[in-house]
Image (cartoon, coloured by chain):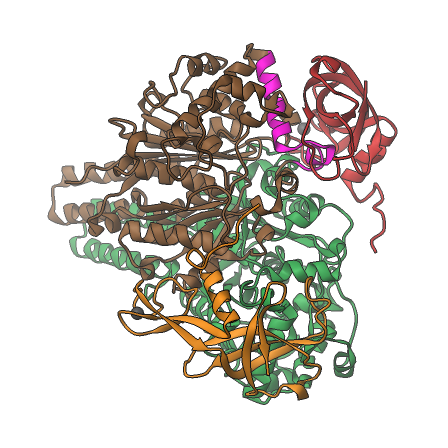
Chain colours: A brown, B green, C orange, D red
Amino acid sequence: MDRISFFQTSPAKYDFAYFTVLHIAHDSSIATVIKLFIMQKAIFYEMTNSKVCVLGAGSTKYGKLNESIIEIALNAAKDAIESAGITPKEIQAGYISNVFGVADKQVHMAPVIMSNLGISHVPGLTIESACGSGSVMFREAYANVAAGFYDCLLALGVEKVTHTGTVHSTTLFSYCSDFFYEGGNGASFPGLFASMARAYMNTHKATEEDLANVAVKNHENGMLNPKAHVHKKITVEDVLKSPVVASPLKLLDCCPFSDGASATILCSEEFAKKSGRPYIEIIGSGRGASPAAVQDREDITTIPSTVAAARQAYRMAGVTPKDINFAEVHDCFTIAEIIDVEDLGFFPKGKAAHAVRDGATRLKGEIPVNPSGGLKSKGHPIGATGVGQVVEVFDQFTGKAGERTVPNAEIALTHNFGATGASAAVHIFRKVDRK
Amino acid sequence: MDRISFFQTSPAKYDFAYFTVLHIAHDSSIATVIKLFIMQKAIFYEMTNSKVCVLGAGSTKYGKLNESIIEIALNAAKDAIESAGITPKEIQAGYISNVFGVADKQVHMAPVIMSNLGISHVPGLTIESACGSGSVMFREAYANVAAGFYDCLLALGVEKVTHTGTVHSTTLFSYCSDFFYEGGNGASFPGLFASMARAYMNTHKATEEDLANVAVKNHENGMLNPKAHVHKKITVEDVLKSPVVASPLKLLDCCPFSDGASATILCSEEFAKKSGRPYIEIIGSGRGASPAAVQDREDITTIPSTVAAARQAYRMAGVTPKDINFAEVHDCFTIAEIIDVEDLGFFPKGKAAHAVRDGATRLKGEIPVNPSGGLKSKGHPIGATGVGQVVEVFDQFTGKAGERTVPNAEIALTHNFGATGASAAVHIFRKVDRK
Amino acid sequence: MMEKLSAKESTHQKFIEAANRKKILAHKCSKCGHLMLETVLFCEKCSGSKFEHTELEGAGTVVTYTIQAVAPEGFEDAGSYAWVVFKIDNSQLRASGFLPGIKTPADLPIRTRVRVAGFDPKHGLMLQK
Amino acid sequence: MMEKLSAKESTHQKFIEAANRKKILAHKCSKCGHLMLETVLFCEKCSGSKFEHTELEGAGTVVTYTIQAVAPEGFEDAGSYAWVVFKIDNSQLRASGFLPGIKTPADLPIRTRVRVAGFDPKHGLMLQK
Ligand SMILES: [Zn+2]
Ligand SMILES: [Zn+2]
C-alpha cells in the first residue's frame, strides 16, 4: 500500500487549501474574505490540525500484584485523573488495552472500570494487539481526539497474568504468535525472539555479550525507577550465566511476566491549556504491520512494522531520528532492543550492538534508550506496556522522573510492538513549556 | 455527561459555519467568495459530512464449525472482499472484533488475518466489548472512515467457542459480567437475563408465554436464512417445555453458543460510487453505556446503554423509530428482545410483550424485528454478532435476502450490546438506489 | 506465591472482610453525602473522592433473582442455588449474592428478606433467608 | 462432537495432510506465478485468487532456530527440541517446524538440511535431520 497514513495526507491536503484561501484573501483584500479566512483557519485548526495532549498520567507499580485486574486498572486510572487535575465526569470515553483479561476472569472491562470511577454512562472498549495493545489503543484514542470526536479521554492499559504461573503465562503468550506455524509447533515467545537473535548474531556478527549489555543498561536505569518490577543491578556475567530459556536467550535476556496498569488522560490542546496544568503534546503517530509469522519475513533481523510506524511518525512530527532526545522502546528481549534502535533509525543496520557497548544508549549517552528501565527492568504487563511508555515520557517532561531524568530533553519517542512485531506503533512527543 | 456524542456536535457546528459562508457569499456576490465557498463546501463534505458506506459483506454459516478461528475469519473476509468487488490491496486497515480468541489459541488476530489475505503490511487491531464487540468495533471503523483517515477498511468479527463445551463456554461468558458481583457469585449469562426477565415479568405483568413468542417468531425467520445456526420451527409449548437453564428462562429462551464470522467492507461514499457496485449508507451511529452490574441499575427492566445509543443514532440520522422499516436487535435471550424493542422506541415501556403477541414484529408485521432469525436462531458467535447484523441489512438492501426480504424497506437499524447491556451500539442504514 | 492482600490495599478485600462480619461495606461522599458501595472510587453525583466509611447491616429484601439450573464452573457442586439482587435496608443501594438451597420460585418470592452470611472464596457473597 | 474437517474445507487441514505425505503444500498464482504457502488466500503480488496447487518436497535448509529449554504447555514432555525456520528447496518459501532431539547448538548449525517427517496433532509439523 503506497497510500501515506492518514496523519500525513490530511494535513498536507488541507494546508494546500488553507494557503489557497490565504492567497485569495490577499488578492481581493475584502473584509468578508478575511473574515472567512479567519473562520476557516479556526475550523481547520480544530478539525485537522487539532493538537492532542497528554494532561495526566499514572501507573501502578509493575510486578506481582495481588489486587484483582479491575482494582489494578482503577488504581492507575485514579492516579492519572488526579495527575490531570480533572474530575471523572470530564472523561468522555474510556479506551482500555488488555490481552488476557480471561486469566483474571474479567473481560468487557471498560464498563466495570467506568462504573467504579462513578461514570457508568461513559462508553468504552478494549483494544488488543498482543504486547503492542497499549500503543495501538493509545493511537486509536489519539485519533479520536485528533478528529475532534472527543475533548478528553481515559486511555488505560492493564494486565494481570503472574498468578497463572510461568508455564501457563508462556502458553497464553504463545497464542499471540501465528499459532498454526509458531506456537503450534512448540515456539514460545522467548523461542521466537531467540530465533531472531540467532539470525541477527549470524548475519551481523553480534555476540551473546552484546545482547547482555542491553540487559545490564536497562537494569541500571530500572534501579532509579521506584515503580519498576525488577530492582537488581546485574553484570554481563550474570546474564551469560543465567539459565537458558530458549537458546541463545537466557533468563536475564528476557523481560519478566508482570502485572500492572498505566493510564493517561488524552485531550485537545484547548482542554489542556484551559486546565492550567503541565501537559505534553503528541506530535507524531505511526502504525505498521509485518508478516505475522517470522518465517514469512525476508529479513529476520529487522521488523517491518517498526520501520513503517517510525517513518510515519517522523514524517508527521517533522523530525528525524537525530532530533529524538530519548526513546522508550520495546525490549521484551535484549535482541529486540538491538533490532529496535536500528529500525528506528538511531543506528545503521548491524551497528547497534557496537553502539550499546559504547554506552550510546545509556542514560547519559547520545540517545538514552529506556530510561524507565524498559520492559526488561520496569516490567511488561503486556496490555499496559505501551501506555506505560507514555507515562514515562510524561514524567520525564513534567519533572517527575527524579534521578533518571534525561537532561534537556524536548522530544521523545515511544515504540511498542505486538508479538514478534507483527503489529507496531510509534509515537513522538514534545515537551510543552508553560509560563 | 451532557455533551452530545461526536457525531452530533460536529455536523451541527460545521453546518452553522457552512451556512454562514453561504450567507456571506450571497451578500457579497463576488466570484472569489463563491469559489471559496465551493472549495470549503467540498472540504467540509469530505471532512465532517463524509458519508460512510458498506460496499461488501459476507458471513460464514453460524453454528458449530470445525475450521480454526483464523480460517473462519478468512472465509468471511474473502466473501466480503469478493462481494465488494475490490482487491485486498485496497484495504487500508483491518478492524477485528473478537472476545475469546484464547479459546482457540489465537489472539493478535489481525496480523494473521491480514497476512493470509496477502496484505501483511496492512495494520489492524482487535476490539472487544463482550457480545457487543462487533458493533462497537464497527463504530470505531466507521468513525475512522468518517474522519477521513481511511477510504476503505475491513471490519470483521469472529468467534469460536463451541469446541470448549457448554459449561466452559458458560464460564467464559460469565467473565463478561461485573465478575466481582455477578459471575463470582454464581450468575451465568442466562442467570443475569433471567433476573432481568423476572423483574420485567413482575413489573409489567408479562408471562413466560410472552417471552416464548419471541423465540417462535425468530425461529420462523431463521428457517428462511440458510446461514442460520438453528433451523427448527418451534411452538410456544416447545419453549415452555424445554429444560430450565436459569429460571424463568428455559433452553429455548436462550440463543445457542455459535462459531462464525461476519465481515464488511467499509468505505467513503466516493470510493463506493467509483466502484459501480451496490452499497448501503450508514446514516446514524450511537454508543451508550450502563452500570456494569445489574444491581446498580435503578430500573432493571430497561437498558440505559440502548436508550442512549438509540437516541444518538436517531438524532444523527434525522429519523424517529417510526421511520425504521426493520431492525436487527440483540436477542441473546427472549427477554432481551422484549426490552430492546421498548428501549429502541418501537413500543412504549411495558407494551412489547403485547405487540409481539399480536405479530407486530413478525416479517410481515409493522416493524419486522430480526428478519435474519436474530441471535436466537441465526446464532450468536459473540465477536461476530454485531457485524452479522450489518451483513443482514446489506443483504436485505441489495437483494440477497431471498424469502426473508422485508418488502419496501429503505431504512434499517441494528442494535447490539455487550453482556447485560453494559455497553451498546446502534447503527442506522439507508438503502442506496443505483441507476 | 503472592501474599494475601490486606484490606488496606484492595477495595474488594475490604468488601469481603466486611461481608465476613455480615456487613455490606459502603462509603458516603464527604462533599455531597451520596452513598455508594465501597468499590466506587469517585462520587457518582459530584465526582468527590473523599468518603466516610459506612458499614451497612447486611440485610435486605429480594429485588430479583434467578435459580441457576446450569451453573458455571466452580458452582457445579453448589446444589440448587439462587443468584439474588437485594435492596439493602436503610439505603437505596443494592447488592448481589449467592443463596443456596433454593429449588423453585416458590422458595423465594420477590421481597423475601435475606441477609449476608459471609463470603466464601468459592461461591462469593453468601446469603441466607 | 465435531467431525474431522476434510481437506476440502480447511487450508490448515490440507496443509496437514500434505505434511503427512512429507510435502509442503503451496500454490502458484494463476495470474502472475507468485508462489505462496497454501494458507494465503489472495496473491501477495497481484491480489489474484486463482491458484494452481503445488506440492513442494518437504526438504530444505535451516535458516534459524531456537532450542526451547522452557516449553509451553503440550510440549513439556517433548524432550529437548528445536523450533526451526527452514527454507524449502527449489523455492524462496520458508516454513517452521518442530525438530526433536536437539540438545545444543552444535546439533544444528545454520544451513543444516532438514525434512518434513509428518504432522503430529500434539507437536505440529514434525521435522527430522
Ligand atoms: Zn458527592
Ligand atoms: Zn499473482
Q: Residue furthest right?
A: D21
Seen from the viewer's position, the closer of residues A412 and C40 is: C40
Q: Quadrant of the C terminus of chain A?
A: top left
Name above or below for residue B391 compared with residue A166. below
Residue depicted at 51% across the width and 15% down the height = A210
- Of B212 and C65, nearer the camera is C65
Q: Position of residue C125 (x, y in %)?
A: 56, 70
Residues shaded magenta: A178-202
At x 64%, y 67%, the residue is: B188
Q: Magenta: predominant secondary structure element?
A: helix
Above or below, comparing residue C67 to residue A86 in the picture: below
**Quarter residue D56 falls in:** top right
A44 shown above or below C66: above
Q: How many marks?
A: 0
Residue B326 is left or right of residue A9, and the answer is right
Is residue A54 among the parts visible in the rendering? yes
Q: Give the x, y percent position of residue B339.
A: 56, 77
Percent across and percent down for residue A296 are 65, 26
Magenta stretch holds residue A192: yes
A64 versus A250 height, above or below: below
Q: Position of residue A321 (x, y in %)?
A: 36, 22
Q: Quadrant of residue C31?
A: bottom left
The answer to whether residue A211 is seen in the rendering is no
Nearer the observer, A139 or A118: A118
Q: Quadrant of ligand 2?
A: top right
Let me know if residue C30 is in the magenta part.
no
Q: Nearer the viewer, residue C123 or B266?
A: C123
